[in-house]
Image (spheres, rainbow, N blue to C red):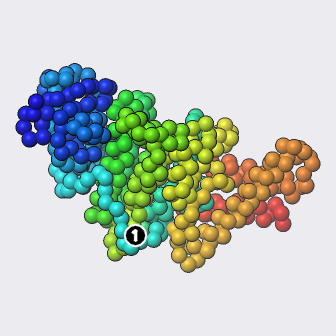
Amino acid sequence: MRLAAHSYRTLAAIRGPLIFVDQVFAARIGEQVSILAPDGRRFSGEVLKIDRQQVLLQVYGETAGLSLDQTCITFEDSVKRVPVSLDCLGRIYSGSFEPIDDRPEVVAEHWPAVSGAPMNPLARHYPRELIETGLSAIDGLNTLVKGQKLPIFSCAGLPAGQLVARILQHARAPGGGPFVVVFAALGLTHNEYEFFRATLADLETQFVAIINLANEAAVERLLAPRCALTVAEYLAFVHGYDVLVVVADMLNYCDALREVATAREELPGRRGYPGYLYSDLASLYERAGRLRDRPGSVTMLPLLTMPDDDITHPVPDLTGYITEGQLVLSRELHQRGIFPPIDVLPSLSRLMQHGIGTGRTRADHRQLADRLYRTYAKGRELRRLAAVVGQEGLLEEDRRLLRLAERIEQEYIHQGSDRRSITATLDLIGKLLQVSRESTG
């Protein structure tokens, strides 16, 4: 029975967060719907699939209490949009961009679509200038550059959440320009949620947080990073902020994408993920960047957990094709009490050369980083050799390199909760390299 323009009570079935509606005309994929429950509650939803006159909807919330004949579905003839303004700063939202910090909704200046708009390649400006994360393993050897997308590859059981919290606390844009962190958390447990709420409460940096919990609808897990990037684009390209977008955990996003694809009865690809996983991830990652003749930048730092520590898994594999490098966490370093456990040898920032300063600063940083990397790599290689022949079988010079590699891990990579500026990081590299020269001199 049709009630009014685009409103229906022709529900055919309700299966978990999915609703099947019959006799629907002129619906479209991605269209937003409003759901009025018999008890007066209102939900939002999205069109997932259209099969002739039957439409499959994904509900942003619980479907308990809905009935087939008393629930009203209204098709809004629009895509998902979010209200943005500078009043969003300091706010915490749900995955569907509803305030969850017990404060009123903001007065919107714009209502951009969460799908965003493709960035014209000719309008892109090359990423330059670093963003300080406060972590020497990143700033000194794998520098994050404004406009870059640099993923963090983690493994189950590693302190990835604590690493994300440190980046949220310590990230800065050198030079004192306007800077903001946009944090999208996907599929959090209750304990993780409380941990990040406490972290956000103590932040000195301006932030916008979008939190999706593990017991919430899968489609909200797909919306959350898009909402985060929409807010980031607004702050960067309308108000000139340098925005760092931190997303954790992209594996939860991809699992939600697989769940929705299964609900749509699509043919699965590798490991059950949909065949369009690459293009879907690219539609997120490629929203990072800078625009010519316009201040502001969007830099993306997504965290993803590699199932079974497998870097060839489809999610990290495809992510590596799209992004400009990777930061790899090490189980061995974590077991030895080193934090952050970033393994600098397989890690890489392809844009580092363009973000480490100009003139003398660039030359100094590049030279120091290369020498430290080379020294540490030799020490790691000797460590494997010593495990076979013992340290007594090594030359004295090799034993000195072995001890120096240990110092690099304990004094440079390991820094606990401390923050180091890029100047302090380079000074520490110089100090360690001076020790190396003295020990071999």
In the picture as drawn, the residue positioned furthest to the bottom comes out as 359
Judge whether residue 353 can be spotted in this image: yes
Query: SS for tag 1?
Result: helix
| Image quarter (top left, top right, bottom left or bottom right) of the C terminus | bottom right
Q: Position of residue 50 (x, y in %)?
A: 27, 40
Judge whether residue 254 can be spotted in this image: no
Q: Which residue is mark 1?
A: 121
User: Mark 1: which amino acid?
Assistant: Pro
Q: Position of residue 207 (x, y in %)?
A: 35, 50
**The image quarter in which residue 367 lies:** bottom right
Count of marks overlaid on the render: 1
- Residue 141 vertical position relative to residue 302 in the rendered view, above or below: below
Q: Position of residue 61 (x, y in %)?
A: 28, 31
Q: Position of residue 353 (x, y in %)?
A: 57, 69
Residue drawn at (58%, 43%) of the image: 313
Residue drawn at (79%, 52%) of the image: 381
